[in-house]
Amino acid sequence: MLKYLFAKNEDIPQGSAAIFFAFSSIVWFVVGTGLGSFNAAKLAFPDFVTGSELFSFGHMRQVHVLAVIFGWISMAFAMAMMYITPALGNTKLWSEKLGIWNCFLWNIGLSLGLTLLWAGITSGREYSDFPWVIDLYIAAFIALPLAINVWMTILKRRTQGIYTTNWFFGAGVFMVTIVFIVGNSPEWFNLTGLSEAYMTWWFAHNVLGLWITPIAAAIAYYTVPKVTGNPLYSHRIGHLHFWSVVVFYSTPAAHHLMSAPLPEWLKSFASVEGVLILVPAIAFVSNLILTMQGKWHMFVENVEIKFTITGVLMAIPLNMQGGFQQTRAINWYVHGTGWIVAHAHLALLGFSTFLEGAAVYYGIQTILRRKLYSLALANFHFWFLLIGFSIYWISMTIAGLIQGAGKIYEVPYIDVVIAEHPYMIARWVGGTLVFTGNLVWLYNMYMTARVGTEIPVGRLPHEMAYER
Amino acid sequence: MAFREYKIGARLFGVALGGSMIITLYLPTIDMTSVAATETSLRKQLSYGRIGGFSYEDPFLLGEGKPKTVVLTEDPVTGQQIETVEAYVYEPGIPFAGGINHPRVLGDGITDLSLEKGRISEADISAGAVFVVSRGSYQGETVNYIENVTATRGWKPEKVLSVAGDANTSYVGSGKIMFVKEGCWWCHTLLPEQTQDWQYFGVPPRLGDFNGESPTAFGSDRKAPDLLHVGSRNSSKEWMMMHFFNPRLVQPHSIMPRYDYMWGEKDASGNTIDFDAWGAAYNEYAKGESLYPPEVPEYAPNSQIRYLMDFILSLK
Ligand code: HEM
């Protein structure tokens, strides 16, 4: 791959950037979930590895979080954009070379940033933890090149209209760039106090709301119609989804700080807007479920659909939880407990990861024109992710309810810690299953690229899933 | 232009996103920055110094470039007994807190008094300065303001430090850096909630309690007790020392990590700390083979753990 960095754009085979991104994202997924599993072990067994600051929980936690968000999820998004955007515009990627450089600089910048965080060099603000030097790097060498490539590909399309997925891609890369720059500005302009704390959560909320959620949804808008062969049920509902994301999802940032002394009007406003997130959520889920009409057997038989629809179905509990847990009536009980950690993993590991997983599976096969090396291993991966995640989610939800009860009944804190202990162990077991599944995935995809059966011209990978 | 069909959509998109940012960024910021700083926030920002996290003065988060907090019972210039006062000492070259550099973040009245009576604009980084929080009246109301005592009373940083002595000096600002760097805020919060839980953890903060502080390090995840007022619940230095070295010494069920590495290589008397021997002796104790745990070494006066302890015990 590296040899293409200095090749002429025309000499680089189509899809190279996507493949480069795909394998980077899988490797980051393995690394990220490995770190997650390590952190979970530390919380279950505090004396697991001690004696060095590098293995202290406080140094490792943010490395896990940012590795999975910027390494796995965002790179898988970039991978999807590199092959889906041109496919939907009936054209080529605007610049494969830019894409390859983008991926190369992304890996370098992220490794550097995470190393700094690991050493404790942080801005001290959750989710925007990177020091501002790295923030600038990300804006200039990660977000912007990706945005340019996506926009130029859409502009150069050879179709009349722009399909739903590409609205989301085009708008998403724009919004994430803005959010990134504005959200990190407290560090550049020395904003302090509550305004800074609020901006931190404005950033965190909008990275989720204007990047991770809509782009994951956009991917499903492509994979489901493409693999099932059914047209999207309704473009109008797609419109509703798009516009309600922009209007409702960009506004409830303050619901992350419900217990902080923010202005009251802001909290009430955020709380109402937060419930309205159910609008895009319902639009999205219903649209895709209706697209599946007549093709439900593929939910069982086809790997990509299995992943995608599982992700889509997880959006239902995710958004129900999200909408209600941020109202004042419920938030005071669950705020700051494991319940929220469970919710975060439902969003990122449940909903989002399953959708991107499908895009990466499908993309690698179509671009390389090679059939999946082993369907059995892919199913193994699916079940390990699903079971591992479920254990994680259930155990952390229970732990959260215990903490919430401890909080309001003023139970001595240590008793809460003791009561949570079994669930901490369960969470570690669940997370380790996910990690194991990912190792298998990496192997499966590597073997697909090396020795997967070639797909003859005119056929699609999933049609051949059960052929030898 | 290939976007022609999308003209209306693109404009609406701009309006929607712009409108959203006005409501969720511009209006709240106007609202929050118009609130006057409370006494808590004046003391916090003066003791923490310029910004927390990654900064020019302290890129590796070692606690450098931060002020020291001293407690004085005599006037360093005249030598007279005075009422106990907390002074914030900025030695030459140490960057000033946000409120000194940008007095307008302090809020109506406080800004005026700090400039006129407190003479904060005369403070000079290259010469250093000492600040205290004083009380004055502004338009008939009692207001706390920042006083640059180097200008008003001639208290020089070196003099103040030598009069106070190491025992009365605490490294609160550097300790806050340790708190951020070590990620204490991934488990602890600095924000008792406005619901019941303040009965246990103390009064929740108010809107003006944060002016000039950065980062606030609230923490979002509460796996451990809130620490905003921990110093008034438990101010035992011995307990804290044992707890940081190995929390299981005082709380067998704790999941808090060991912070023994913050002791550094040498203890207070300059001897190398033998962590392996300590660990072995502790394991014996943990298995029930010996009756007493090994002694926790006394920390050196410039160790990271000193900073951290000073910060934690300052949280009243
Ligand atoms: C092997 C699987 C995983 C394990 C064991 C794991 C473990 C953890 C742990 C222990 C934490 C700290 C939670 C706390 O502070 O109580 C955490 C936080 C987090 N993880 Fe994971 N994780 C895993 C996979 C993932 C994946 C795949 C994602 C997303 C793609 C993810 C996203 C996050 C996020 C966003 C947080 C921060 C949650 C918060 O703010 O409270 N994790 N994870």
Image (cartoon, rainbow, N blue to C red):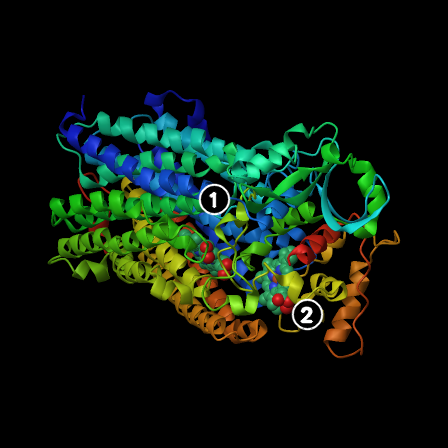
Residue found 31% across the figure and 62% down from its top: A324
Residue found 74% across the figure and 49% down from its top: B85
Q: Secondary structure at mark 1?
A: loop
Marking on residue A240: none
The residue wearing badge 1 is: B35
Observer-nearest residue: B157 or A186?
B157
Rendering coords of residue A294 (x, y %) = 11, 58
In the picture, the quarter occupied by the C terminus of chain B is bottom right
Observer-nearest residue: A366 or A232?
A232
The amino acid on which the numbered mark 2 sits, given as a three-letter code, is: Arg
The amino acid on which the numbered mark 1 sits, given as a three-letter code, is: Val
Observer-nearest residue: A353 or A370?
A353
Q: Nearer the viewer, mark 2 or mark 1?
A: 1
How many C-alpha atoms fall within 10 Å of the one at disc 1: few (<14), some, or many (≥20)? some
Rendering coords of residue A463 (x, y %) = 19, 50
- A448 with respect to A277 (left or right): right
Marking on residue B248: 2
The mark total stands at: 2
User: Vertical placement of B95 versus A448: above or below?
Assistant: above
In the picture, the quarter occupied by the N terminus of chain B is top left
User: Vertical placement of A111 versus B225: above or below?
Assistant: above
